[in-house]
Image: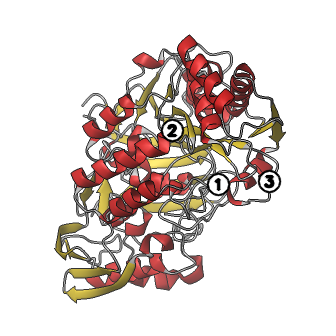
Amino acid sequence: MKLSTCLAAVGLAGAMTLTAACSGADTGSAQGTANVDVSKLKLTPTTAAAKGAVDSVNWLLEDEPESLDLDTQGGSAGRTVLSNVCERLYQLQPDMSVRPSLVAKETRPDAKTLVLTLRDDVTFHDGSAMTADDVLYSLRRHAEPEMEQSDEFANVSRMTKTGDREITVAFKQPDALFTKALAGDAGLVLNREQVEKAGDDFGTPGQGDACSGPYELTGWKSGDSITLTRSDDYWGEQPLTKRVVFRWAADSAMVNALSTGAADGAYLDTVSSAAALRGKSGLDQHYGPSTAALALIPTERGGLADPDVRKALSLALDREGIAKSGYGGLVEPWATAVGSGAWGYEKAAFQAAQKQLTGAPAKPDAEDLAAAKDLVKNAKAAPDTPIVIGTDSTQGRLVIANAVRAALTQIGLKAQIKTVPSATYGEFYGDKEARADIDVLVADWYISKSDPAGFYDNGVTDSSNNWVGFSSAAFDSKIEEALRTIDDSKRAALVIDAQRLFSESAVWIPVAQMPTVLVLNDELTGPPASMAYLYSPWAARLGAKKG
């Protein structure tokens, strides 16, 4: 589940990889646009079902994929294309739940064994049948140490073909998140013959795909466009849209292309683009669940080493003001450091637990500020030197940085902002030395799995993402048990307990959750509005509103 940041690749070991966000993050300005009332911004998993056929759709990406071999190069652009071409063993649904896809049935003879019975009606685009040998080859390729998804297999001891249509996976210990990983890039099934035939050129312009999805890769003109064409021999249900042509554009060019009708749709990487497009004639906007969030991450430097000081900052932070000033109201003040798209199971339990957290008010009142000042006054190690806030110069992050400085000043602490170029900002995530001069990072990211357990392991004592040195035996125990607990309700209870401990110590300070934003020609409908578009065939649902 190694996610690549938009700014710099970050390969951190463990069950969750931290990144600068590539989905839903704001990297521009929302100034000059009407604010949205976030209390009325309803997140919906999908759009209305399409009724009519469409010959061709023009779709925008933020940038051109570096490769269409997701084992060697991840990123949201490549996933947005390949999710329609290459199928996975499991499939992420619009509501962020996970269901079998190329798997007909799963069984667990014991807690450390997973048996996958494969569908018998799946064919690749070259007409050959998907076999257990192809699936085993794909899983072993994903697990190779140099591949993007290798960390998803760290708990696997053995993968073998145990029948004509059967794969058995043995684990070193029970792994609750493995099937969720198989709904992501770790579960992509490739045609072994076609991959080996292409060799080192696999995934590059001029090459075909090696997959079984509803669309085939029929063209990639480097620097210009990528074309997908409906696979008429697809084993599943036929899409309504015959052809999808992808091109790429930066924020302002993307806004212009969508505004003028030169493009029919896009999943927006920047909230600022969504704000700029609100109310444009001929366009619909849809907002869906995502795991993406904005937060403050205290660093090893120590200015926020005292948990009481961190809690005080959280109580004094004006999240509502940040949402309005930095993001046009398109983000929602939030009490946890991961978005609601992570609630892929036991949603009601996680929703109720979120509402019970009181340490991150949307807008602090007099009581919150008084409590924050008392925490600082009585803290064992309140800093007497300025707390340094690390950010780049993009509008959203600057608004957050200024709000943090204002909150710290209001509770009697000194603060200063360190602004670096965007390319340097990306280094803060993976390089301890790069962040040596800052006390807290203004951060945004997403996790690839719809399970909060895949986020909260950042807080375990030995996590490389636990920069502030939080250590709690109770927290570690609950997360370790959750990652081994297959039963959803039991795992949710453990994660919710761990979430409470994480929040009470303000290990990371939550700011807001960010939705997935889908902008679509108002004559079209059908795709998911949620983050599921990165991992499931969204274009297969795309079509005209009218039949």
Callout 3 amino acid: Ala
- Viewed as shown, does residue 49 lie left or right of 457? left
List x then y, in percent, for residue 491. Answer: 29, 54
Residue behind mark 1:
467
Q: Nearer the viewer, mark 2 or mark 1?
A: 1
Residue at mark 3 to residue at mark 1: CA–CA distance: 11 Å
Residue behind mark 3:
436
* Residue at the image position 42 percent from the left and 31 percent from the top: 357
Q: Answer yes or no: do the residues labelled 2 and 3 have beta carbons within 8 Å?
A: no
Comes first in the chain, label 2 or label 3: 2
- Taking 410 as reference, is 510 above or below it? below
* Residue at the image position 49 percent from the left and 74 percent from the top: 150
- Viewed as shown, does residue 418 lie left or right of 517? right
Secondary structure category for the residue under label 1: loop
- Label 1 crowd (10 A; few <14 / some 14-19 / many >=20): many
List x then y, in percent, for residue 180. Answer: 34, 60
The numbered dot on residue 266 is 2
